[in-house]
């Protein structure tokens, strides 16, 4: 499965100008480790460095910060299982999602 479609990247790059301002952004994609811990919610992507992603990460604790596109794409866990994208995820305001996760 393709983790990053052109549509996802276009939406994420369009929000890059908002930086860490969660009120002005939506989560455009959700990625998860089907064989272990880790969920990454993508807010924005640097158009000049597409490997640099920013979003909400739920990995042992909920944090807001950067993560790497290439690391998500190249990760292989037990039995060679990689990171997957939630195909049924619907966009949600980033601040709303973050508040749901920390409660």
Image: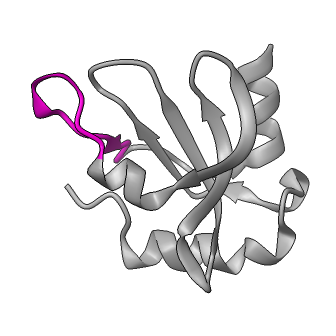
Name above or below for residue 21 compared with residue 48.
above
**Above-or-below relation of 31 to 14:** above
- How is the model colour-coded? one colour
Residue 73 is inside the magenta segment: no
Q: Position of residue 77 (x, y in %)?
A: 24, 28
- Tell me which secondary structure the magenta stretch mostly adopts: loop
The span picked out in magenta is 75-87
For residue 9, side relative to residue 58 (left or right): left
- Image point 12% across, 33% down: which residue? 80
| 92 lies above or below 57 | below
In the displayed orientation, state which residue is furthest to the left: 79
Q: Nearer the viewer, residue 16 or 94?
A: 16
Count of numbered badges drawn on the protein: 0
- Judge whether residue 83 is colored magenta: yes
At a point 67% along the width and 18% down the height, the residue shown is: 61
Q: Position of residue 102 (x, y in %)?
A: 78, 19
72 horizontally vs 95: left or right:
left
Which quadrant is the N terminus positioned in? bottom left
Which residue occupies 77% across, 33% down? Answer: 98
Q: Is residue 44 above or below residue 55?
A: below
What percent of the width, then of the height, locates residue 75? 30, 42
| Residue 26 percent across, percent down from the top left | 71, 56
Residue 86 image-quadrant placement: top left
- Left or right, 3 with respect to 65, comes to left
Say which residue appears at 80% left-offset and 13% top-offset: 103
Horizontal relation, residue 32 to residue 30: left or right: left
- Viewer-proximal residue among 75 and 5: 75
């Amino acid at each position: 499965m393709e983790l990053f479609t052109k549509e996802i990247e276009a939406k994420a790059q369009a929000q890059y100008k908002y930086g860490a301002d969660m009120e002005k952004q939506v989560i455009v994609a959700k990625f998860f480790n089907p064989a272990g811990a880790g969920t990454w919610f993508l807010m924005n992507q640097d158009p000049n460095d597409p490997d640099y992603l920013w979003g909400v990460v739920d990995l042992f604790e909920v944090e807001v910060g950067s993560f790497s596109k290439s690391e998500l794409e190249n990760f292989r866990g037990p039995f060679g299982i990689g990171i997957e994208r939630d195909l049924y995820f619907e966009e949600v305001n980033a601040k709303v999602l973050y508040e749901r996760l920390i409660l």
